[in-house]
Image: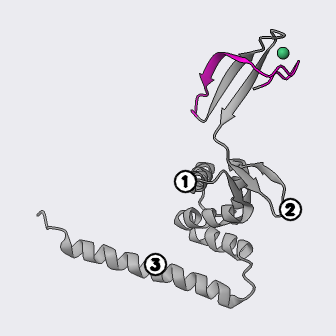
Amino acid sequence: MHCPFCRHADSRVVDSRTSDDGASIRRRRQCPACQRRFTTIETASLSVVKRSGVTEPFSRDKVVSGVRKACQGRPVSSDDLALLAQRVEEALRASGSAEIDAYEIGLAILGPLRELDEVAYLRFASVYQAFDSLDDFESAITSLRAEHAEQAGRDSRADVEEPDGS
Ligand SMILES: [Zn+2]
């Protein structure tokens, strides 16, 4: 890495430190030409390509603020939102690409949000997927209902199969 002061082509690492959350490494570097020191921060790259073509670093805060409105009045805490944003980031990183479309973030939000709160999920999905009729709501609700039924079916089968301890 070249020196930001004199543009010398090389620099020497004098100290490396991992951040508390382990998400980045700070390195103190020294330029062998002008002897000045500077710091670099290394993180695993994850950038978002917006519809305008502009690229910006992925931000959990933006995920939270994007979802918060849909969660108004719902029993969702800021811890829940922080965890949701973490799950979204993990899912996006797991895709393996360093650049993702803004649209994919919305997609990655839908699953965890549905598990968190179905009303908030419907609100978010209606805006994000541009529901424009009652039919759209109806089919989203139908698929939620189908999942509930499936879940209930699994639960009752589990009751039957579970050995009776008494
Ligand atoms: Zn220098």
Nearest the eye: 59 or 138: 59
Q: Amino acid at mark 2?
A: Ser
What is the x, y in percent for residue 73?
Answer: 67, 63
Task: Name the secondary structure under disc 3.
Answer: helix
Whether residue 20 is situated above or below residue 126 in the rendered picture: above
Please give the label number shown on residue 147. Answer: 3
Q: Marks 3 and 1: which is nearer the front? A: 1
Q: Residues within 10 Å of mark 1 (few under 14, many from 20)?
A: few
Residue nearest the viewer, comparing 53 with 33: 33
Residue 10 visible somewhere in the drawing? yes
Magenta residues, as a range? 2-22
**Of the residues shown, which amino acid type is indicated by label 1?**
Ala
Q: Quadrant of the C terminus?
A: bottom left
Instruction: Tell me the SS state at disc 1.
Output: helix
Q: Circle 1 is placed at which residue position? A: 94
Name the chief secondary structure element in magenta.
loop
- Residue at 59% x, 48% y is 79
Q: Which residue is pictured at 76% across the width and 20% down the height?
A: 10
* Residue 73 falls within the magenta-colored stretch: no
Q: Gap between marks 3 and 1, in whole Å?
A: 26 Å
> Which residue has dot 2 on it?
52
